[in-house]
Image (spheres, rainbow, N blue to C red):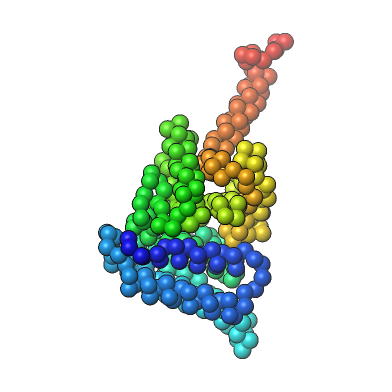
């Protein structure tokens, strides 16, 4: 790969944009302008320095163009937030144009990576909130960065793609997650769709994990900050993950409600951690957990309903049901 470090740059851009979306404070014009410039620079570097080894250079080149479109989307958001000469309806139209631009960006990202990157489009008009638009830009940048790292990293070990600046301890944490997922997959705990999407990315002291097939089902372990972030909109799964991270990995966690942006603009579970390897094992349990919880719930409902039906039949027909006392 030589000195090609674009994936690492894109991960940093993604982090900066997600921080803006999660902060709750309206970003200044200068802040948005700086990220616009960062994305334009990344687009130029992407176009000019693609290394050999990628199967679909043309598609990747097209995705590089979409980084330029991402920069223009950030510029649109800046205009909508800070151009006082525009009326409220004009500002809303600018945000709608940014939304349409993001749809085109996602199409290009899907073409090259096979993965969608917009979650908020499921939210109707609420997706036009500037925080959600910025978060979608960050998500599309994230998918591109993962793809570039996955297809052209310094090395791959199991499901872990490893950048050249990766910290050795972070690599070991990713391996711990990878080994745990293999055990759980062999036990039949994962759906086939989710199992096929699992991947880890190690950049510097961070381990970023794709933990399922749903768009935005991600997690991050930051060894430098000693934090774990988990993104999911399923409250039952969030509750279990938070409890496991506290009780097993020694973390101190808070759950952020989806109505306050948890799982999209912000992590749904945020923890200060003690043991990163144990945290990695916990995150391996997140995959397909919604199915496992759902299966147990359905079986419990079925057993309850069946018991009620059998009891009513017994009362009606005067039949004795096994395991039920009857005086008839």
Q: The N terminus appears in which quarter of the rendering?
A: bottom left
Q: Is residue 240 visible?
A: no
Q: Residue at x 41, y 48 (%)?
A: 160
Question: Residue farthest to the top?
Answer: 327
Residue that lies at the very extreme toward the right in this rendered image: 327
Residue placed at 72% from the left, 10% from the top? 327
Spot occupied by residue 126 in the image (x, y as percentages of width and height): 60, 66
Residue nearest the viewer, comparing 98 with 197: 197
Residue at the front extreme of this rendering: 168
Which residue is at the front of the view, 155 or 59? 155
x, y (%) of residue 250? 65, 41
Q: In which quadrant of the rendered view does residue 111 lie?
A: bottom left
The x, y position of residue 289, in whole percent, is: 54, 40
Residue 13 appears in view: yes
Query: In the displayed structure, would residue 325 be above or below residue 102?
Result: above
Residue 148 point in image, percent of width and height: 37, 60
Question: Which quadrant, please, contains the C terminus?
Answer: top right
Q: Residue at x 34, y 58 (%)?
A: 152
């Amino acid at each position: 790969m030589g000195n090609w470090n674009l994936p690492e740059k894109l991960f940093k851009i993604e982090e900066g944009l997600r921080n803006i979306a999660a902060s709750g404070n309206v970003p200044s014009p200068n802040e948005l302008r700086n990220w616009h410039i960062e994305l334009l620079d990344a687009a130029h570097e992407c176009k000019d320095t693609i290394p050999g080894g990628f199967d679909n250079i043309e598609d990747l080149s097209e995705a590089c163009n979409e980084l330029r479109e991402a920069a223009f989307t950030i510029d649109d958001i800046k205009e909508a937030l800070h151009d006082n000469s525009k009326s409220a309806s004009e500002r809303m139209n600018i945000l709608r144009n940014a939304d349409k631009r993001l749809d085109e960006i996602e199409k290009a990202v899907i073409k090259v990576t096979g993965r969608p990157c917009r979650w908020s489009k499921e939210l109707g008009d609420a997706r036009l909130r500037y925080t959600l638009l910025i978060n979608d830009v960050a998500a599309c940048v994230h998918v591109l960065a993962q793809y570039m790292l996955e297809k052209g990293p310094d090395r791959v070990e199991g499901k872990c793609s490893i950048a050249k600046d990766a910290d050795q301890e972070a690599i070991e944490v990713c391996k711990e997650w990878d080994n745990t997922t293999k055990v759980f997959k062999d036990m039949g705990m994962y759906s086939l769709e989710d199992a096929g999407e699992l991947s880890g990315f190690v950049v510097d002291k961070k381990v970023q994990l794709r933990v399922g097939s749903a768009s935005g089902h991600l997690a991050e372990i930051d060894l430098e900050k000693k934090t774990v972030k988990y993104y999911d909109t399923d409250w039952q799964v969030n509750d279990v993950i938070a409890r496991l991270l506290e009780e097993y990995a020694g973390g101190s966690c808070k759950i952020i409600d989806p109505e306050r942006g948890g799982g999209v603009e912000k992590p749904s579970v945020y923890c200060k951690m003690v043991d990163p390897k144990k945290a990695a094992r916990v995150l391996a349990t997140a995959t397909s957990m919604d199915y496992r919880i759902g299966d147990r719930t359905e079986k419990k409902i079925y057993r309850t309903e069946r018991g009620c039906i059998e009891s009513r039949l017994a009362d009606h027909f005067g039949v004795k049901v096994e395991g039920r006392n009857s005086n008839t």
